[in-house]
Amino acid sequence: MGESKPAQGRSIRSLPLVLAVVAGVMVTAFAGAALLPDGSSGSAAADLTDEFVGAYPATTPATGEVVEVLLQTQIAAIDVVETGATAVWTYNGQVPGPEIRVRLGDTVRATLVNGLPESTTIHWHGVRVPNDMDGVPAVNQEPVEPGEAFVYEFTPTDAGTFWYHSHTRGSEQLERGLYGSLIVEEPEPFGYSQDVTWMIDDWLLEADGRLVEQFRQPHDVTHNGRWGNIVTANARLDTVLRAAPGERIRLRLVNASNARTYAPDFGALDVDVIAVDGMLVGAPFDASGFVLAPGSRIDVDLVVPAADEPAVVFDNFNGEGFAIGSIISEGDPIATSQFPVPTNPAVPDWTGAVDADADHSYVVSLGRAGDGWPQWRFNGDAFPDGEPMALTEGEFNKIQILNDSQVLHPIHLHGQFFKVVTRNGVSVDEDFFRDTVLLMPGETIEIGLVALDAGTWALHCHIQEHADAGMMTTFTVGA
């Protein structure tokens, strides 16, 4: 009945694992950070680079374990609503696709077999993979044609909550169901009694359960993308997490929607965010009001109280009040696991970046293509046009993005994590990294990052209708 269990869907796990010890792995090569005779760095950018050292590893030693995964795209039908089956595009006949769970340091070897009538690819969202494994057509991979196969192989660098999804014609392929979760577990478990994933999605369905198949409509392109009329967790309307009173749960929330933004409301439950976009935060904070943009994830820490009624988790972003899932307390109380809340104390402060000039800047705007079709642009160019932004590996950069439009834009960077430094010129106190950030209408944000992963990467809006209408550009990371 849609219950959440410690292992969601069909988890794929390796055999006994050799634990990788990554504590203390440090970034060792940074440009421009030479010390002056007084012991200080030579520039503000170098100081900000120095602050970053140890924030997260440049590399992670491989354990030698290889987790083999088969992901076959195929057309299937699932029961989303009671009135009729919904035809979907799937990995292995299910939505979400199989949850992949590995330990940090394990190598993922995922074979994509394309059983669809059109080409596709897989992007490993938030995972710092080798550039040629990132799955973006026209950037770092040729599309996988019908009947063909492609092997993705990578060793995740970071533990955390990540996901995989089609990066080809996302406004349709993602909407039809091509997504799944990738959980990279820490070498040593923290002690939660359950570790549960909810992939949140919305669906635009007819009364008989059929998917509305008019994709990439002009209204959706020029506004906030395609929003559905129902919301599910793990493709169910009745997803339930059952736990005994006193159980301490790690709940991972993934926004897999094409365009809908969520603000999960846990009601009276005491819930702390411990990770954003897969990365542990510097200090836990109350989950109330956190905005979960398309592509974003949060991990929350909660203790299930004794209660006679289910605790319903609602979405309160725009007042519609969709139920996401329920938490039911049942059985005899147990002693709550006692351990420190997981954190990353090495998240840099970077307040020194607030008044620094931006190294690069983008303006987001809406225009028209030559055929009159709506077209989204970075600095006046729609993908694939535009000059790639060039970043030097291991150096701090500040990037400014102005939303010169009246709609939302969740901005996602491939291959890198960043911190939001300012919003509309005001310093932002976020003690965590992101790979996706929501840009509000008319808003200007500034982000700071130290790029560690070389190659040519995509930067785009994660509203699929916007990305498919040109709102993507590239940046390069090199020595």
Image (cartoon, rainbow, N blue to C red):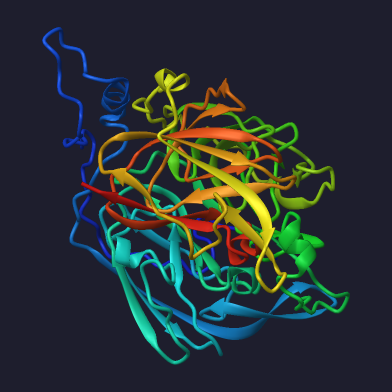
**Residue at left 60%, top 74%?**
173
On the picture, is 59 further left or further right than 131? left
Instruction: Give the quadrant of the N terminus.
Output: bottom right
The answer to whether residue 7 is above or below residue 213 is above
Q: Nearer the viewer, residue 267 or 76?
A: 76
Q: Nearer the viewer, residue 8 or 333?
A: 8
- In this view of the protein, can residue 239 be seen by the observer? yes
At which x and y percent is residue 31? Answer: 20, 34
Q: Nearer the viewer, residue 208 or 130?
A: 130
Residue closest to the far bottom: 147
Residue closest to the far right: 207
On the picture, is 372 further left or further right than 115? right
At which x and y percent is residue 452? Answer: 28, 44
Residue closest to the far front: 370
The answer to whether residue 379 is above or below residue 302 is below
Q: Nearer the viewer, residue 212 or 399?
A: 399
On the picture, is 438 further left or further right than 165? right
Tally of numbered tags: 0
The answer to whether residue 349 is above or below residue 369 is above
At which x and y percent is residue 283? Answer: 47, 25
**Residue at left 27%, top 20%?**
43
At which x and y percent is residue 213? Answer: 75, 78
Residue closest to the far top: 38
- In this view of the protein, can residue 108 be seen by the observer? no
Quadrant position of residue 17: bottom left
On the picture, is 247 further left or further right than 373? left
